[in-house]
Amino acid sequence: MDSGLSSVPTIRQGLPGSGDERWNSATQRANGQQPGAYAAPAKPLPPNDFQKFVLESTGQALPLFGAGFFDAAPDNFNPQASAPVSGDYRLGPGDELQIRGWGSVDIDVRAVVDRNGQIHIPRVGAVPLAGVRSVEAESTIRNAVGRYYKDFQLSVTMGQLRGITVYVVGQARKPGAYNLSGASTLVSALFASGGPSANGSMRNVQVKRGGRTVTELDLYDFLAKGDKSADVRLQDGDTITIPPARGYIALTGKVATPAVYELGGDKDTLGSTLALAGGLPVVADPKRAYLERVDPSKKPARSVESFALDAAGLNRPLRNGDLLTVLSLSPEFGNAVTLRGNVDQPVRAPWREGMKIRDLIPSKSYLMSRASVQRQNSVLLTTEEKQRVEDGYQLTRRAQDASSPRAFPGDASGAYGNGAPGQPLDRPGPRLRGEGGVREVRDNADTLAERIGNLVDEINLEYAVVERVDSQNVTVQLVPFNLGRALEDANSPDNLALQPGDIVTVFSVTDVRVPQAKRQVFVRIEGEVRRPGIYQMNPGDGLSNLLEKAGGLTPDAYLFGSAFYREEVRQTQQKNLEQLVRRLEAQTQTQLSSSAASVSAVSGDASGTARLRLEAEARAQQQALERLRNINPTGRIMLGLQADNATVDALPDVRLANQDRLVIPSRPDFVYVLGSVNTEASMLWRRGGTVQDYLSQAGLTSGADKDELFIIRADGSVASGNNSSSWFNRSITGAAVQPGDLIVLPEKTDHESAWSVFTRNAKDITQIIYQFSLGAAAIKTLRE
């Protein structure tokens, strides 16, 4: 043969469409589907009678073990239509081969084995391939071509395999005849047919060929162990028989796979079935198992027995209808004691003979909580920076929950500004400036003072408790002890001997409220004192002791205008204010409902006027409630000083509490006049000047309402004509004015303006706050 390129013989032959496409389309048409249509998964099996019996007995809907494997099979599954062909596959009529050659001959042939077991290659002739293994097909064809050509290369690959018809009968989910690929096996055919039905056997599937049984497959070996040794390749005309199941048992409780299991034969034991289920989890109690057995020959037909899952228990044979329940282990510790509460690390420690409190808590340093250490480590962080860190944590958690890469510090989600990592939109943080990177900390007096004295959670050394559980009597005994004495003296009776299961709880002074005398007191004083700052006070100290520590008053101090704040009072004021708002809301709703009913009874033009008046009244009441909601209680306590006798000795005997704050201003030189006056201004204070003197100086308008005149004193109290008798011996206009007082003269209410509404509400609100403050101070004083 001429080996020149121009004289290379060309052998080409093909079939329309690729093998996979033709096979898939033909299979879908044969099953009533349009080519390329999606095959929906098969419907799950309905429960059989034994599953219903288990549901009625235990309340658990247990699945049939192995049935879920076939639930994923589509209704028109085509097994191995395009799967690789194993080397031991034997060719037969209908198999397709793709033959390509190059060199001295150019071959591109797609050949199909005919009924005689041969393929035909142009210029080569017939090549017998029936019964030839797929791995030997290339060498067989190479020898046939080599009889005519030399110096060539050859490649043979399998195309579309031949189709076979198998029959699935018996207790199958979808019995019938199936057109499958020639490389299909028993397992793939079962998958195509949907597997056994609810009553079909998974442990004795048979393949019959030519009147004899070729194999018997136990699907449990395949599903539980992956053993496919009994799986065989099917041939055309094979029959797959699925007999009824021999019986069922159920496994419930603490087993790896609770389900209903089919019995494989008389040799099935509890151990072999548990092995199929994956064994027992570590939390199962092998000492307690209950077996419910059904015996129709007895009355009653059901019985129960208990035994341990030891060697004898695992060798017990099972019967049809058995229901085994495995109990879980008790989570009780047998040799542990627990330490919790305000400690460095809550821990469950091993108990040993003779163990005492000091063995569990060797020293007081073990009582330093992690929160206290964190506060010490973050002393350089401002409140804004701490909030930024918390926002970052929350944002990270939201990002993890939403799986969103944008919701993270520095993203474009809007939570952080300018795209800078860690920079919130509205919170300017510390800056680095200059080459040295100087840190600019934006602290103020409030934020800095709040962080002093609160670094450590103060421990209640007077009281800790041991919870002791008596498992025999199922009771709890509380054994309190003095933690301080236990840690100081190993021989102290408070150094209690511990028992297994004891729980030791350590409290802080805020967990269980302790007497004020046993708590640390940090008080802030500022203003006109010689050494403003934050001081640690002794239990029982009062305001005079605080002033003494601060070095006393300065010459400019205005003690009458002092402001004394307490956090507990602020919380009480806030609570009272919320109760007041709720009560007024209820009263407003009742009043408006009554007014609306009255308006509905009015007819004619008066009805429209009444409705407008009702709407105006509702708006006014809503505005008043909104103003009340916007009030921020300060926790100020009136000291009750007289303006002409405001000395240190006149200070009330109020014991200081933690986080108290005393502000002593300098004496102002002005008096303020607001309201219906011709000149709203700050006027110089004159000793002996009265309210009338300042009103005359400011000038009254024609709409001034002198009956509603009131004064907001520098100490926060309010004086008005309604309570002038309790403050002065003469009318409010003749009252002496003190430095810093605010004189407010409202307008008459019959032609209310915005300013008169403000002044009237300001008077009401200040009186409410004043009453709250007096009430809170009185309650506090009585309590102490």
Image: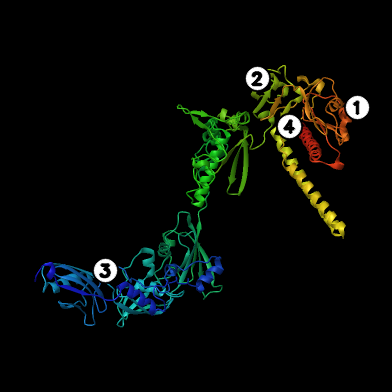
Q: Nearer the viewer, residue 371 or 686?
A: 686
Asked which quadrant contains residue 530, the reply is top right
Do residues under tags 3 and 4 come within 8 Å of each other at their CB atoms? no
User: Mark 1 or 2, which is nearer the eye?
Assistant: 1
Do residues under tags 1 and 4 come within 8 Å of each other at their CB atoms? no
Do residues under tags 2 and 3 come within 8 Å of each other at their CB atoms? no
Res 692 label: none
Q: Residue at image x 31%, y 78%?
A: 164
Is residue 329 depicted above or below 261 in this figure? above
Is residue 152 depicted above or below 484 in this figure? below
Do residues under tags 1 and 2 come within 8 Å of each other at their CB atoms? no
N-terminal-most mark, 2 or 3: 3
Answer few, some or many: residues within 10 Å of disc 4's Cα (few below 14, many 20 plus, some between 14 and 19).
Answer: many
Tally the marks. Answer: 4
User: Mark 3 or 1, which is nearer the eye?
Assistant: 1
- Label 1: which residue? 730
